[in-house]
Amino acid sequence: MTQNPPHNDTFDDIINEVTRPSEDRLLLIIHLQRKREFLGALADTLDAMRGAPEAELREMVAKLPRDIRHQIRAFDRLTEIERSVAMLTSAFSDTLRKECPDLTATELQVCTYLRAGLTARQTSDVMFVSVRAIEKHRQSIRKRLGIDKGVDLRYHLAHLTGI
């Protein structure tokens, strides 16, 4: 049986998602990661149900809808928080781009995460790159901004004029 090509509206929606501004893509990636983690936990619960005694199985099945609804509400709250954070980080990125035009888009993204308090490990997880790649970006940012190794980059970014 041959599979029909995706409907144009769906394809257009996917293209629009991919071409949205980087902050929106980041929020989408974070959101998808959270959902993946929840679905993984749900799959683990379902696996645990296979060998459970009947009384325990009934209890586990009874809890599933409540847990799923709770997670949906949590996703909705996080979406609102993420939108607020995106507005703030977007303003920071725009100002930093004007103040430091030599920074690449990736370096601007790293600066935003650094200013927000993310570690190199956390930033690498969000950006789906290695910790070493983040460290290289930080070195490049220091070089482009003329910041010595002894100066805290996070502090410097937080106290740039006009940001």
Image (tube, rainbow, N blue to C red):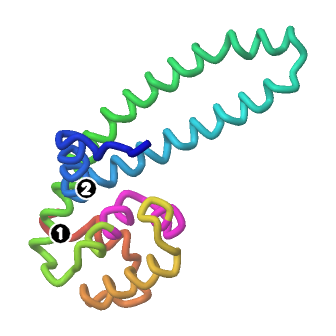
Is 122 magenta? The answer is yes
Distance CA(mark 2)–CA(mark 1)? 24 Å
Q: Is residue 66 above or below residue 130?
A: above
Q: Is residue 4 above or below residue 93?
A: above
From the image, tell me which residue sits under label 1. Answer: 96
Image mark for residue 45:
none
Q: Helix, strand, or loop for circle 2? A: helix
Q: Give the total number of marks visible in the rendering.
A: 2
Q: Is residue 150 above or below residue 28?
A: below
Identify the residue at horizontal 49%, vertical 42% (top origin): 34
Image mark for residue 18:
2
Badge nearest the viewer, 2 or 1 = 2
Q: Helix, strand, or loop for circle 1? A: helix
The first of marks 2 and 1 along the sequence is: 2
Instruction: Name the one closer to the observer, 138 or 46.
Output: 46
On the picture, is 16 further left or further right than 77?
Answer: left
